[in-house]
Image: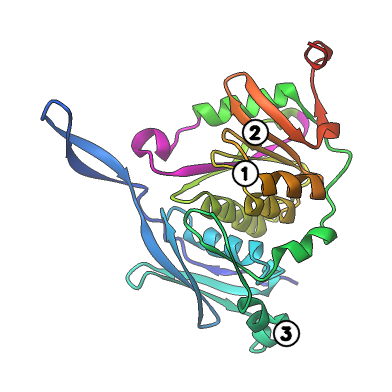
Amino acid sequence: MTLPIQLTRAARPATYEVEAVDEKGAVVPTSIAGEHPLTLYLDRRELVTLMTLGGAPEALALGYLRNQRIVDDVARIAAVQVDWETGSVAVTTHGRDFWDQAGIEERLSRRTVTTGCGQGTVFGDLMEALDAVRLPEDVRITQEVLYTVMERVRKHESIYKQAGAVHGCALCSNTGETRGEIVYFVEDVGRHNAVDAIAGRMWLDGVGGADKIFYTTGRLTSEMVIKCAQMGIPVLLSRSGLTQMGYEIARRVGITMIGRCQGRHYLLFTGERRFVAPAATLFA
């Protein structure tokens, strides 16, 4: 039996109001995005300090541990407690010997510098896990659903529209009558924080990724593709572009990756077998 996780609910305000002076010399009250350092401790050992909007700190901590492959099962987690006075989030596990059992010390000794905003390192060698990833082959995404996702994200109330300076990520349904609907929407100062927070929420709610679509406003780098694969999500969308390594990894793991999604425009880069477009567009 999985024991319930002791969880704080310590979200910070998303925006703050400051005064700015415009091109005409007028003082204009202006909303800006929040940004807070949050140091993550696992069983009292410091791992990393994340710069975050602070909207979902508990989910962010869990998603970080999941996507860095430091903790492989949410059932191992006993508590996630955020304290903004100290700028820390303390994650505790069941049992005293978790670090030794999981081989964490060895994984922490290996770091890969990445281009992620809001995060700069990846613990361990995430590439090792790619060969074990098995994404569903029978999943399809239609052009109609693609456009639905793009439109719903565009219309979604967001901190970016109010204050800018953030990235957004959305987990969307790809089944039944709810196809294209947003399941989770998270914004943060770094796109990696946003994807980690969604990964944490999926863990907490027991949500799988096989029947989902992941959308991000940020570029599709190697680490973003790896995280999506680890979450078991076969379809990855972005309004931005991608990197060469992100492209190669998407082909390797079999992700359907679509970039430059804006208006009615998109570019299908990998995983063509899952994409269903009207016949007229295929031969236009």
At x 63% / y 21%, what residue is drawn? 265
- 253 and 15: which one is in front? 253
Q: Tag on residue 220?
A: 1
At x 65% / y 36%, what residue is drawn? 237
Query: Which kind of residue does numbered mark 2 sit on?
Result: Gly
Query: Which quadrant of the figure contains the N terminus?
Result: bottom right
| Neighbour tally class for label 1: few under 14, some 14-19, many 20 plus, Cα within 10 Å | many
* Callout in the foreground (1, 3): 1
Query: Which kind of residue does numbered mark 3 sit on?
Result: Gln
- 94 and 277: which one is in front? 277
- 57 and 112: which one is in front? 112
**Residue beneath label 2, please?**
259
**Residue beneath label 3, please?**
101
Element on which disc 2 rests: strand
Dot 1 and dot 3 residues touching (CB under 8 Å) = no
Task: Reply yes or no: does residue 99 show up in magenta.
Answer: no
Task: Reply yes or no: does residue 168 show up in magenta.
Answer: yes
Q: CA distance from mark 3 to mark 2?
A: 40 Å
N-term mark: 1 or 3: 3
The residue stretch that appears in magenta: 156-176
Where residue 276 appears, x then y in whole percent? 81, 25
| Neighbour tally class for label 2: few under 14, some 14-19, many 20 plus, Cα within 10 Å | many
Q: Tag on residue 100?
A: none
User: Which image quarter: residue 218?
Assistant: top right
